[in-house]
Image (tube, grey):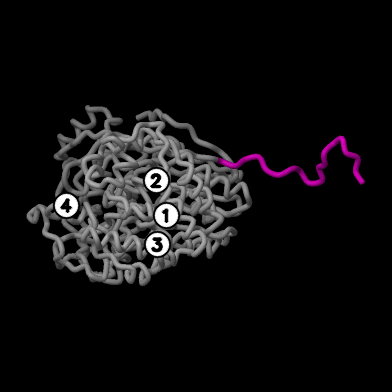
Amino acid sequence: MKIVTEKRPATGRSMVVTNHPAASAAAASMLAEGGTAIDAAVAGLLALTVAEPMMVGMFGGGMFHMRGADGTHTVLDGQSIAPAAAHATMYTPAKPDDPLVIEAVDKANTLGALSVAVPGNLLAWAAALEREGRFSLADVMQPAIRLAKRGFLATPYLSECAATAGEDLLLDPGIAALFMPGGEPVKPGTRVINGALAETMETIAKEGPGALHGGSIGASACAEIAARGGIVTNADLAGHSMIPREAVRGTYRGFEIVLPPPPSAAGVHVVQMMNLLEGFDVGAMGFGSVEDLHLKAEALRMAFADRAAATADPAFVPVPVAKLISKEYAAQRRAEFDPARSRAWPAGVTPGEAHTTHLTVADAEGRIVVATHTINSLFGARFLLKETGLIPNNYMALFNPRPGLANSIAPGKRVTTSMSPMIILKDGKPWAALGLPGGLRIFGSAFQAAISLIDHGMSVQEAVEAPRIWTQGGPLEVERGFPEAISDALAAKGHVVQRVPHVGGGMCAIRFMEDGMMEGAACWRADGTPIGLAGGLARAGVRFFPDAPR
């Protein structure tokens, strides 16, 4: 199947790919001024909190996967946690008999103040700068502050997102004024200014992350959340901490795949699925064939069954990482695969054995950042903290409202996500780096992109834009980029097919070439924009020609 791309890649010896052009410019400016990939990534993420406000913010959480100049990998876990007052039965399941549905009655875990968890994004970003940044937090915040003060132009994508969430946004005058002015979605080209957020950022630039985590900004935010019925306190903010974690590693056809560990579900389950596929000649099947998609769909079903059973915050649940990523476990599960028919996959392990944004950045000195951060749903909890201009997350939606499960609610427990900031190595050297937003659909989409690059020989632009599928055990979502005949053939194998306009969000990826050049690509599912820094400094010894040497 031929992939027809809509966007074009960028090339350079340093590369930035984010899901908004203003954020890509902010990140690229850090590289141009002599900063590292870490400086660029944090500047880009902060700019995204302004220009992609429906996706990410300082009152959210995420995973910051960085490869240092010395080749070491570290995952800075800035995930959100359940507040100290949270408990396993604080919500009533909306559909108690459907295990795939974790929404609560009255949307209590997805909408409004009771859905807000304790954020950790800013803690991870500040920690990253301390490790391998050359600039201060105040320095890298300047592009974001300018965007918030001067405003940015709303894109059609932002307008569409506002339309999707519009009914809920209209319940809060503050957020409606920004994104539903006059009761209608903000029109593309409208300048969006959030002066309160600019002031908040200026305070944090002066005082550091403590301004939010236990300081005046946090106190103001928590007072507003409490007034709306929420339970996050300033003590929760002050007590939260970033955790550096060791990445999960797997191998696939001579490549090494490096991903975040639990509480992210990505690492163990992407490696698990790739181990399963390693026993098949996927390249010979051809991208988009019935055989190719049936195999990937069954791998997804298997992975989600194990995810529901055993993947959660490792401080609360012993996650069987070694078994899940083992070749032996993959061989056992592969023997259960039926090439002719879809099946219901029970979990093979037990405990004890969101709308998001993403960026990918690399500098010429060997540092790489793949970072996925979020406020969970579109516009998070869907209200604005008027004094600070912050949009709170609704991360409590990712816990299961039923007690007694791996992902049930407990005070201080980190949320489990599908974030998949992935780095692929070949012979120990970076070969590709990628990630994307998209809630539960993230790690399945990242997995498919990696297979497209390795098995199907796609270019990085083709891989990020190629059509996708997704299932967590129920219906099989199939992007409309696949022919209807393929959907019909999958249905004949027992899949309940739903044709959808897109699966997951905008992917940001970089391919590393043998000559030191990089190719960056973003896809049509978001406002993604790659910026490469090529060229370089003047040749040694060069002077301005008309001036005589002295």
* C-alpha separation, residue under disc 2 versus residue under disc 3: 41 Å
Which sits earlier in the primary sequence, circle 4 or circle 2? 4
| Magenta segment boundaries in residue numbering | 532-550
Sequence-wise, the earlier of marks 1 and 3 is 3
Q: What residue is shown with label 3? A: 217
Q: Is residue 39 magenta?
A: no
The disc label shown at residue 450, or none = 2
For disc 1, the marked residue is 257
Q: CA distance from mark 4 to mark 2?
A: 35 Å
Q: How many neighbours does mark 3 have within 10 angstroms: few (below 14), some (14-19), or many (20 or more)?
A: many
Residue 543: within the magenta?
Answer: yes
Q: CA distance from mark 4 to mark 3?
A: 27 Å
> Type of residue at label 2?
Ala
Q: Do the residues under discs 2 and 1 have CB atoms within 8 angstroms?
A: yes
Q: Position of residue 424 (x, y in %)?
A: 45, 51
Q: Is label 4 in contact with label 2 (beta carbons under 8 Å)?
A: no
Callout in the foreground (4, 1): 4
Q: Which residue is mark 4?
A: 107
Up/down of 120 relative to 182, above or below: below
Main secondary structure of the magenta stretch: loop
What is the quadrant of the N terminus in the image? Answer: top left
Q: Is residue 298 left or right of residue 517?
A: left
- Closer to the camera: disc 4 or disc 3? 3
